[in-house]
Amino acid sequence: MDLYLLSEILEPARIVEARADIVEEGEDPRAVNVVVSGWACRYRQFEDGQRQIISILLPGDCCDPHIFRLDRRDHAIGALTQVSVARIAGHAIADVMNRSAALDLAFHREALAAAAIQREWTVSLGRRSGVERLAHLCCELHARLTAVGLAEGMTCPMPLTQPDLADALGQTTVHINRTLQDLRAARLLALKSRRLTILHPERLRRLAKFDPAYLHLRAADDAVRRIETIRP
Amino acid sequence: MDLYLLSEILEPARIVEARADIVEEGEDPRAVNVVVSGWACRYRQFEDGQRQIISILLPGDCCDPHIFRLDRRDHAIGALTQVSVARIAGHAIADVMNRSAALDLAFHREALAAAAIQREWTVSLGRRSGVERLAHLCCELHARLTAVGLAEGMTCPMPLTQPDLADALGQTTVHINRTLQDLRAARLLALKSRRLTILHPERLRRLAKFDPAYLHLRAADDAVRRIETIRP
DNA sequence: CGTCATGTTGAATCCAATCAAGGGTAGTGG
DNA sequence: CCACTACCCTTGATTGGATTCAACATGACG
């Protein structure tokens, strides 16, 4: 029923190439865009070329700049891989919310979860060391991908390049490369040809101080608990 | 009219002492708490004693943990000074939203602005140096206080101690102390007995790469523009 | 007057950035 | 098939910013 409602108002997905911006110049600020496939990111670029990736958008996430004044945008949204985006027109949103309390709740939860992820990102950059940050990001992405059914066991796609990781974790490519090698040497994870495998989940989580509570994902939560009861 | 509606459902403010937590054990997650006076912060504490302040809550800001599952809270909210908090019961919220589109919009804007501030915080921790971070925080707090009428010209209250600043900016007290002295030596600001004065707004903003656009505050925006047209 | 919280300073150490250079792989075009 | 390019990954040497540990100063307050 709710899915039917959704499909009714969903406009055909549009494709954005990797490295291009998902722009919405002058778009209705009430419209909602959802990533259907591929990875994107919110980022902020400085004049001197420095870039900070603010958050990573996976399939199922909303990618709206949430701006009320369109003349001054505080960040951009870029495609990390080829991305397909579905759009729900602004006028349809309010209507659908009224007709389905479940959808209303779902969008609400999405926003709250995104805010929680943003807070955790802040914590990472503020109080976690280089290795911890990288380990934490891997844990988070794997958990989120698992929740939307895009992971196969402890393996998941990982299209971020080392420069991307550097821009996300507030470091340089060179240093990302070294910490990555540390994690590999410690046999905690494997990262090759855009695929990540977590070799030792508990140890990686402990190192990263990763607690999936903030993701508010029942599935991921349960998965962690299940694993931890298997190997205590 | 809208103010009347608000006052009608506002419960009497309660007082929370400095350094105490603003806890809502088992509270209705739909309820809304607003800081009436004093400063508070969202923070995350690790087992090893490390603390990261995630955001600063000034008078007028909402201080809700926004949790749907109360058993697992991902962060806490603490009072930095003595704080008085007003509460709107959960059941009243939905009602009031229906009766006043302006209030509905206001709460929406509050949430979007908070998210934008959170993103900017992420950018600070990721890509700004120590001095830049401190300068940026001073600019932001001054702008936000100006917007709610709590600044007097370029002077505003600043109750954060150096350990607080360290926990907010991801550094140590010692280092905060030194960068603070650098800013004083450069005659950019004065900070004494819990009061901050910005001595050279444009230079400080330039150093911090501060662009008030993300705050989405018309007033602060205008103030900056006004100053910049006076002294180009 | 002593106590406690906050602010200040110095010296040694470490983590991460920077500079610089080399290697791998894929795509393109002659 | 081979040059040529672009992009990513890797490594070493060097520099600098930030932490740590430790001590001391200051100021508010009972």
Image (cartoon, coloured by chain):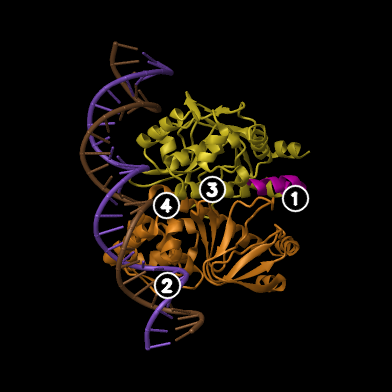
Chain colours: A orange, B yellow, C brown, D purple
Using the rendered image of the protein, determine whether residue B73 is visible from the camera's viewpoint: no
What is the C-alpha distance between the residues marked 1 and 3? 32 Å
Q: Which residue is mark 1?
A: B98
Give the letter of the chain under mark 3: B
Type of amino acid at the residue the image marks with label 4: Ser
Q: Which residue is mark 4?
A: A124
What is the C-alpha distance between the residues marked 4 and 2? 23 Å
Q: Could you tell me which secondary element the residue under label 3 belongs to?
A: helix
Q: Which residues are magenta?
A: B96-110
Residues at marks 4 and 3 on the same chain: no
Mark positioned earlier in the residue sequence (4 or 2): 4
Judge from the rendering whether residue B112 lies leftward or rightward of residue A30; answer left or right.
Answer: left
Type of amino acid at the residue the image marks with label 1: Asn
Q: Residue at x 69, y 45 (%)?
A: B106
Q: Nearer the viewer, mark 4 or mark 3?
A: 3
Residue closest to the eye, A170 or A228: A170
Q: Residue at x 64, y 70 (%)?
A: A86
What is the C-alpha distance between the residues marked 4 and 3? 14 Å
Q: Which residue is mark 2?
A: A194
